[in-house]
Structures are given as structure tokens and as C-alpha cells.
Amino acid sequence: MDHIESKNIIFDYPSKKIFKGMSFKAHSSSITYLAGENGIGKTTWIKMATGRLKPLSGSITFGGKSIYEVREKIAVVLDEPPVYENLNGYENLIALSGIRKLDNKIKLELEENLKLDKFLMNTKAKGFSLGQRHRLAFAAALIRKPRYLILDEPTIGLDPFSWELIKLQLQTMAKNGATILITGHDFEQISEIAENIVIIKDGVALEERSIRELKIKSRRYVQLLVDKPELVTKEFVASEIININNQNYVCIPIIEEYDINSILHAVYKQDIYIFDILIKTPSLKDIYKEIINKKEKQKQEIPAYA
């Protein structure tokens, strides 16, 4: 299988431990989201994957092969795409992609798929916006027809129009068999296209599974605006009062013992008036925070021995 595999990666900077056995797989024909807090090591991992840094131990392979064996099949788009400011768009594509010549077919595809028209591409890149630079760097990656594509913070500086164009191309690449790995903090936009997520915490892959599976297993909540919130919280011990638009709602987790109908029946039975009902389905960012918070809580519960 043409997956990207990170296997037992250990890496330290002089003043900080980064990875303590980082293992995960990004599968072919899919888009994997590598998520984690700032400074957790995502960019460091990309540098190791592309051969710019060496781990102390462990390996990163592409279809079982090292970066040096498959370099021509890999493309990387960085969060701040490098451009040659005194070259025009077409000249930049040649320099960044490594091809010798841009034929008319490629130019037409770029114009149709990424809206990189002739007028823009004949302009020196120093006048390009960040969104245009991202599209240019992504175009250079597309020209290489990579089997493996790594994107570091691809949504930074992108307007919605540019992101929609890139998103469509990424989905097409995945359908055609490419292995795509994305880092970033824009959970909402990345969750639109990613199928799997790897959550990094404390130097390891804390969670690795399909986003669909995480969402199915995540807990939903019913949020009630009522006239007697104290009675509701007494009835449902796992509930809490939260503020929504300057009003206090009672937030109740939906579990097997209490589905939505059971919760509403129990509330009505106590002669409690309901003004509003909201059903909260956690977003990917909510699920991520829950996983991280659970890990932090577990760390705090571990007894410290003198």
C-alpha cells in the first residue's frame, strides 16, 4: 500500500523533547489531518519526512521506501510558500516544480482548475497576494503529479474562493489514489475534506482514527432553556448550566439511559416549562478538545511519588 508511515520516531531539540515514539499511518486514496497544538512538532515532522532533519531513531517511509527512493513522487506545500519575486508566475512554476517546459495543456488546466489566468501568470510574483502564492505553490505540486502530497497549514491566508479551488483538487487527487497529509489549526475547513485524523500530544500520536468514527462515537447534548433550571440539574446529575446568547441553558448529555425523548418526558413530568430546545452535535474541534482535555485529566490523576 502507498501509505506514509511514521514509525517510532524519537527526536529532541537541545532544549526540548519533541517526539517520544511517534507512530501513525496516512493511507492512500485519502486525506489525513495531522492535528496538534502550536509547537507540538508538526513542522518538525515534515522536515524529517522530507529529509531535512534526521530522527534520533525510527523512520518515515512512503510505500515502504525512504524519501531518497521516492523523492520524485513527493510534493510539499509549505505554510509560507516560497516564490521567486522577480520571476513571473509561469517561470516560478518551472522553477518550483522542476519541469523543463510548460505546455499549453498544463497552462489551460491551471487556468480552469485554479483560476491562474494568463494575465496573472505573466505578472512578476512579488505582486502576488498570499492566496495567489498558495495557489501557485499548489499548482507547482500538481504539475509533479505526486503520489504523496504534504501540505503545511494550507488554509493560512486563503480566501474562501481559493480554498474551494484547492479543496476540489485535493479531493480529486485522493480519489485518484494519492496519499495526502495536511497540518493546520482550521478544524472547520480541514474537516470538510479530511477522512482521518492523527492527534499529536506529548510526543506521540494520542489518537488515530477516521473522523466519521469519532463523530459517531462522540456524545451529543440537548440544551434546554427552562424556567426552573435548578430542578433539571438535580434530575440529571451529569448536566451543567452554560451561557448561550446571555441566557442560561441546561446542557444534558444524551446517553443510552436518556435519549432525547426520555429527557423531555422527565422535564415535562416535573411541570417545568421549556422555552427553547437545542441539539448540540460536537464539531471536530470540540472532539479534539475533549480528547486533549481527557489526556490532561489523566495526567493530573497519576499520583506523584517522592
Image: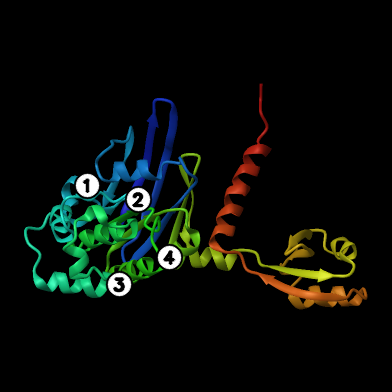
Question: Spatial distance from mark 3 to mark 1, Cα to Cα?
Answer: 24 Å
Quarter holding the N terminus is bottom left
* Tag shown at residue 15: none
Say which residue label 1 marks.
Answer: 67
* Tag shown at residue 79: 2
- Per the image, label 4 sits on a secondary structure element best described as loop
Question: Spatial distance from mark 3 to mark 4, Cα to Cα?
Answer: 14 Å
Residue 64, image x, y percentages? 25, 51
Q: Is residue 121 visible?
A: yes
Residue 281, image x, y percentages? 62, 68
Here the colouring is: rainbow
Say which residue label 4 marks.
Answer: 195
- Type of amino acid at the residue the image marks with label 1: Ile
CA neighbours of label 3 inside 10 A, class few (<14), some (14 to 19), many (20+) = few
CA neighbours of label 2 inside 10 A, class few (<14), some (14 to 19), many (20+) = some
- Type of amino acid at the residue the image marks with label 4: Glu
Instruction: Give the number of the mark in front: 2 or 4.
Output: 2
- Type of amino acid at the residue the image marks with label 2: Asp
Q: Residue at x 54, y 61 (%)?
A: 284
From what the image shows, is residue 133 above or below residue 295? below
For this view, does 12 lie left or right of residue 188? left
Question: Spatial distance from mark 2 to mark 1, Cα to Cα?
Answer: 21 Å
Question: Spatial distance from mark 2 to mark 4, Cα to Cα?
Answer: 21 Å
Say which residue label 3 marks.
Answer: 172
Lower sequence index among marks 3 and 4: 3
Q: Residue at x 43, y 36 (%)?
A: 18
Lower sequence index among marks 2 and 4: 2
- Type of amino acid at the residue the image marks with label 3: Thr
